Image (tube, rainbow, N blue to C red):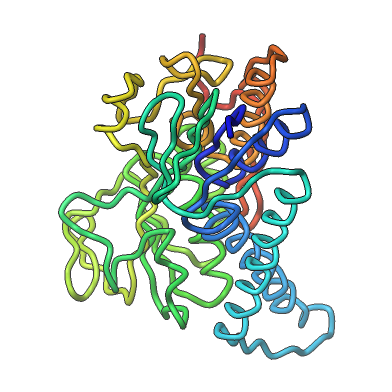
Amino acid sequence: MMYDAVIIGAGPGGYVCAIEISKLGGKVCIVEKNGFGGTCTQRGCIPTKYLHSVGDFVRKASMSKSYGIDSKIDLDYKILKSKMFTTVGKLASGIQLLLKDNGVEIVEGEAEIISPNKVKVGSKILETKNVVIATGSTPVSISGYDFKEKILSTDTFWSMEELPKSIAVIGGGYSGCEFASILNVLGCKVWLIEMEEALMPDNPQEIGKTLEKYMRIDGITVLTNSKVEKITDNGILVNGQNIDVEKILVCVGRKPNISSDEMKKLGIEFSGKGIDVNKKMLTSVSNIYAIGDITGKYQLAHVASKQGEVAAHNITGHDSEMDYSVIPFCVFTFPEVAFVGDCSGKSG
């Protein structure tokens, strides 16, 4: 069978692309090896927002005494985690069902692009007119320190059975700020460490400085202009000061899931940031597209979904281009931060 497209990865970019191609009359197959919904559903957006919603309950309950309500907060993380991942499982199953209901063929396993028109999954060869790479990204570690029991990534964080009493969050970007804010509300003693002058350094300082003020009021120790010098068995060394913590959460970015050898073999241009694509989401190879985190653009689920739609339209002969000028951003801290469009503070 010849497909109009084989999509590798069923995250928010891949599954949206597959459904859109099918709706536009194309024959499409999607390949997934790690769970439907990708990082967003399995280890990212959904579980963190679930924690945020629980944190919101805790926050409101802790303020209820001023309204004459005497409430005792006793958080059972095991119950919380079980219910959270039950929700994750339901959403992942829902995505799989949505794909099936829209006529998308599903193949589970690890994909290898052996040519621009052939994708291998196990012993199966899928022939296709187009390939869409939507393989996402993985957390970046700190040089010299691998992720292990004490040092967590935003992926391995979810393996914990209990919340730590204390934690240092390294990296004050969107993800680091969210985790720091949420964990603080849930009862952890939190240190948030950022090497730049302000939190969320890709945006105007006013945003990061304002958020920092609220975090300090809530009891988070925020260290900006600070760099981790060493990680020890007891904690971390920052600015010559040892901070004793149970866990360390590294939030210093994500890197694309790229096989350099595979990209070179296929003639796909790429860099350390990701696969190079044009506004049509097309790579340097005329029938291979790339969408989502793998492109090194904005690592946001809704951006990946829009890129998936654009790729689907171009694959099915409906001309379409990406427009990054009005992207909405939301950071689920306490208080939340949101903006739309270019808020980089850079001119030109």
Nearer the observer, 143 or 334: 143
Q: Residue furthest right?
A: 68
Nearer the observer, 238 or 296: 296
The image shows residue 14, relative to residue 55, as above or below, that is above
Instruction: Locate residue 44 relative to residue 135 in the image: left or right.
Output: right
Q: Residue furthest top?
A: 348
Image quarter (top left, top right, bottom left or bottom right) of the N terminus: top right
Q: Residue at x 74, y 72 (%)?
A: 60
Q: Residue at x 63, y 59 (%)?
A: 46
Please state the total of marks drawn on the protein image: 0
- Which image quadrant is residue 247 in? bottom left
Nearer the observer, 32 or 91: 32
Instruction: Locate residue 30 relative to residue 163 in the image: left or right.
Output: right
Q: Residue at x 62, y 27 (%)?
A: 4
Q: Residue furthest front?
A: 1
Instruction: Locate residue 277 relative to residue 16 in the image: left or right.
Output: left
Q: Is residue 34 visible?
A: yes
The image shows residue 104, relative to residue 309, as above or below, that is below
Q: Is residue 204 visible?
A: no
Q: Position of residue 289 (x, y in %)?
A: 51, 24
Q: Position of residue 274 (x, y in %)?
A: 38, 30
Q: Position of residue 209 (x, y in %)?
A: 51, 43
The image shows residue 73, relative to residue 287, as above or below, that is below
Q: Residue at x 58, y 70 (%)?
A: 185
Q: Position of residue 161 (x, y in %)?
A: 46, 82
- Which image quadrant is residue 94 in? bottom right
